[in-house]
Image: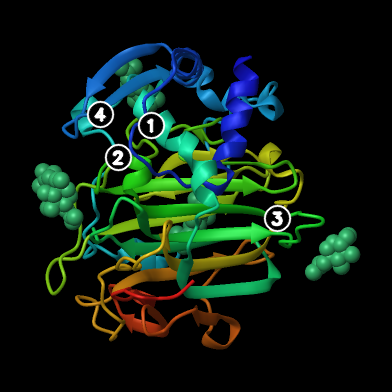
Amino acid sequence: MVIILLLSLCIATKNYEVYGSMPNLYKSEDLALDEHLKALNKAPIKTIHTEYGRIVDCIDINKQLAFDHPQLRNHKIQLKSSIQDTKPEAMKRDKSTRYSNFGLNEKDSCPNGTIPIQRTTKEDLIRANNFGTLAQFDRGSHFAGLVMKHRIFFGIVGTINVYNPPVGDDQMSSAYIWLSSGVINSSMPNYVVIHAGWQVYPGMSGDNLTHFFISWENSIQHTGCTNMLCPGFVQTSQSIFIGAPVKNVSIYGGAQYSMSLNLTQDPNTKNWWLKAQDMDVGYFPAALFSNKLNFAMRVGWTGHTKVFVGGTSPQMGSGHIPDRNPRHSSYISKLYYKDRFRDDHIPLKDSVRVYADNPNCYNANYYGYVDNILQHAMMFGGPGGNCGL
Ligand SMILES: *[C@@H]1O[C@H](CO)[C@@H](O)[C@H](O)[C@H]1NC(C)=O
Ligand SMILES: *[C@@H]1O[C@H](CO)[C@@H](O)[C@H](O)[C@H]1NC(C)=O
Ligand SMILES: *[C@@H]1O[C@H](CO)[C@@H](O)[C@H](O)[C@H]1NC(C)=O
Ligand SMILES: *[C@@H]1O[C@H](CO)[C@@H](O)[C@H](O)[C@H]1NC(C)=O
Ligand SMILES: *[C@@H]1O[C@H](CO)[C@@H](O)[C@H](O)[C@H]1NC(C)=O
């Protein structure tokens, strides 16, 4: 029963869109939601009330939701990545970047052997259940970013400055790093993808804050998920939790706050480890991807907006078309990828493709080396508006 519920949510969230106000529930639906919540929310060892009004539970690391996934039944948890830290010198020297805080405050971090998980509420599930319904009203996604493809990749790295663009209830605005393999082919889907970054998505989070988010999808098995609404991602961090609100955001023309992200495959386990702000958050187990992510075939850095029921598209990033000025433009800086030899490389201008599907609304530009703080950076964003489908 529980598995069916979890899997059905997995499928429902495949398009990972949420939206909607609270409908009146029939009693049977209400009971089903309660049952589902019981399956999602594991027994807390410690409970924390965050300043944002949400509850975060410290739960036993070995009893986290991920292990309810059928493919992870006999999974042996990997507590630490075995990847050698070969961070380039230029990255180690950087002391000038201001990093946003997200996750638990230091004094609140979870006890050893436990991890923080935001408690899922009935409202979260009702919004999530509307994913499927709403997906058919997906009135258009827009992207502006940088992609590298037709190669073998073992990692992608970038530092994104974080904004809090105004986003309506039926809109989404985000920026992330991503990697994928396979092709989108409706007659024979074999596409797998991982995303990590920030998003403003009231239909999902129930607020207009900027949140740290992850998502993954395996179109072969019709599974996938955003954040921790269904089993998949294995969290190891005692302080950063998935879906956490980002406390410090950039101001146009003023201070810039950043989120550094590093997604790298562990050569021994083939799990994809995610680091945020230089700390291990956890990993996407290899078993989720039907052997399709033994390496990635594409990696990218992008801004993405979405609108569901029509109308105008929201701002992307800072809301301004990139002008090379780091106080004006949203950017993903310190770009690196790991090649087939697992060495870190800076993307060369002639090996990337810059894309923006509607340059009047949003644009992207790869400037190469900008300065010693940003190093190699892609800038993106724009005001949105009537951007078409
Ligand atoms: C990303 O993290 C991996 C694993 O720790 C490390 O080997 C790599 O050097 C990091 N890349 C960058 C550019 O920091
Ligand atoms: C928790 O684990 C860390 C790292 O292993 C250790 O340094 C620390 O003393 C432990 N804390 C407690 C309260 O056991
Ligand atoms: C977010 O919502 C709050 C409360 O509804 C509102 O005061 C604030 O202006 C909103 N912020 C943005 C950026 O839309
Ligand atoms: C999609 O899959 C079908 C069935 O295997 C194949 O015939 C077709 O060529 C594929 N299309 C693309 C674009 O790969
Ligand atoms: C980040 O935001 C938090 C919470 O609002 C605040 O306490 C902290 O001082 C901010 N940090 C910086 C560096 O501005």
Quadrant in which the N terminus appears: top right
**372 relative to 310 in the view: left or right:** left
Indicate which disc, 4 or 1, sits on the residue closer to the N terminus. Answer: 4
Indicate which disc, 1 or 2, sits on the residue closer to the N terminus. Answer: 1
Q: Which residue is mark 2?
A: 206
In depth, the one of 122 and 91 nearer the eye is 122
In depth, the one of 230 and 311 nearer the eye is 311
Question: Are the two marked residues, 3 and 2, in contact with CB atoms closer than 8 angstroms?
Answer: no
Spatial CA distance of label 3 from label 1 is: 27 Å
Q: Residue at x 24, y 48 (%)?
A: 209
**217 relative to 120 in the view: left or right:** right
Which numbered disc, 3 or 2, marks the residue closer to the eye? 2
Q: Which residue is mark 3?
A: 191
Q: Residue at x 22, y 26 (%)?
A: 108
On the image, the x and y values in percent for residue 356 come to 47, 79
Q: Which residue is mark 4?
A: 54
Indicate which disc, 3 or 4, sits on the residue closer to the N terminus. Answer: 4
Question: Are the two marked residues, 3 and 1, in contact with CB atoms closer than 8 angstroms?
Answer: no
Q: Residue at x 81, y 57 (%)?
A: 187
